[in-house]
Amino acid sequence: MARLLVLGGSWFLGRTVVEDALADGWEVTTFRRGQGGTDVPGVTLIRGDRTKSEDLNRLAAAGPWDAVVDTSSFVPRETLAIATALAPVVGRYVLISTVSVYEGWPVEPLTENSAVLECPSDAGPDFGYDGDPGPSTYGFGKAGCERAVAEVFGPDRTVLLRPGVILGPYEYVGRLPWWLHRVARGGRVLAPGQPSRSVQPVDVRDVSAFALHTAKADGPVGTFNVTANGRETMSDFLTACQRVTESDATFTWITDEEWLAAQGVAQWTELPLWRTYRGAWAVDSAKARESGLTTRPLFDTATATWAWLRSGTGTVDHERASEQGIDPDKERTILDAWDARERSRNDAR
Ligand SMILES: NC(=O)c1ccc[n+]([C@@H]2O[C@H](COP(=O)([O-])OP(=O)(O)OC[C@H]3O[C@@H](n4cnc5c(N)ncnc54)[C@H](OP(=O)(O)O)[C@@H]3O)[C@@H](O)[C@H]2O)c1
């Protein structure tokens, strides 16, 4: 039986990888401190802190593993230390990175050949800076983590996965949960931007399946963007939310995005997934698709997430869980202002 080590494994993506790996027949070990999230029954637990060298030595002594899937790397020097400790006992290293490593994110269309932020492999947590709309210390850190893994494991044993926005069951950031709850509440819903705008959120189960595909000894290696194919739109997304919640909500599309932004609506968080920059949903994932990535329709993601939210286990005690969503009074005020604007424009015609 192939052996898999998951660094993390208690939240959203890590937990999905663990569940899927067990279902696929992997023998799974997880390494984490035991502070947050849920352990999946059936795994071998190793408790430890990735910032402590004695814990890394103890972890390495429990090997070997055919592969590690690392969902919890954010600080390059910590990743360098853990990769160095694991290199003698792990076949290949699958690092969950992000599209935020690109210099051009979210402004420009991106492929794997686009320029990546410069960050040394031994950088600390504060390397880089936060710009608006980018780059971010998060992106710099992930770029340094990628470099650390590549330096230690080399090109034949390194997989760098760069997902865009991930949605699905166990999502603690709360993007899709917020939209599902908002649409379920019904009434007039502020729908941001053009309904035809293409979007690329990727289902957590598709990221997990591709990560496990690359973890196999004969799986592909290298760097891959992991996003949906962009054939679905913001209208498809909200329609999916409406269908799965069986809501009578109506959508008022505020198509003048400059006007919407001028009302003081924060992109990305107050109206999750709404971002005006042209690169936000222009990430090319053709390379991953040629190597085995498949992505499901948004409707499936919404269905599974709504089922999870309604299952009684769909509450997430996570510090980021309440980051998303616009205040209902603010939404109403903006809709009223939009109506008034449309009326006066019609009168002027
Ligand atoms: N959400 C998105 O849309 C999105 C998009 C692109 C990429 N990503 C990437 O996807 C990944 C998401 O991972 P996730 O959903 O599994 O959640 P996560 O919140 O990154 O999980 C963190 C895990 O690491 C463990 N951990 C934290 N500090 C530790 C330490 N010092 N020592 C050992 N273990 C530690 C935590 O358990 P303990 O607290 O018990 O230690 C937990 O299991 C991240 O790498 C993120 O950057 C996410």
Image (spheres, grey):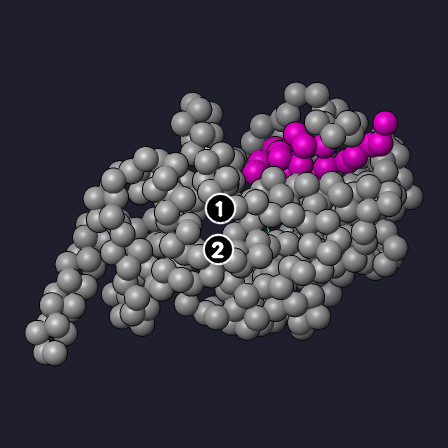
Q: Which residue is mark 2?
A: 232
Q: In the rendered view, would you say 104 is above or below 54?
A: below
* The magenta stretch spans residue 16: yes
The image quarter containing residue 121 is: bottom right
- Give the amino acid at mark 2: Glu
Frontmost residue, 15 versus 119: 15
Residue at left 41%, top 40%? 177
With 64 as the anchor, is 256 left or right in this view? left
- The residue lying furthest to the top in this view is 41
Secondary structure at numbered mark 1: helix
Numbered disc 2: secondary structure: strand
In percent of width and height, residue 164 lies at 57, 55
Image location (x, y in percent) of residue 12: 56, 38
- Cα separation, mark 2 vs mark 1, equals 8 Å
The residue labelled by disc 1 is 298
Q: Quadrant of the N terminus?
A: top right
Q: Are marks 2 and 1 in contact (CB under 8 Å)?
A: yes
Q: Quadrant of the C terminus?
A: bottom left
Q: Which residues lie in the magenta part?
A: 1-21
User: Where is residue 273 shown, x and y percent of the image?
Assistant: 43, 55
Residue 249 belongs to magenta span = no
Three-letter code for the amino acid on which mark 1 is drawn? Leu
Is there any visible trace of residue 319 in the rendered image?
no
**In the foreground, 289 or 70:** 289
Q: Residue at x 43, y 34 (%)?
A: 306
- Residue 338, compared with residue 92, is above or below; it is below
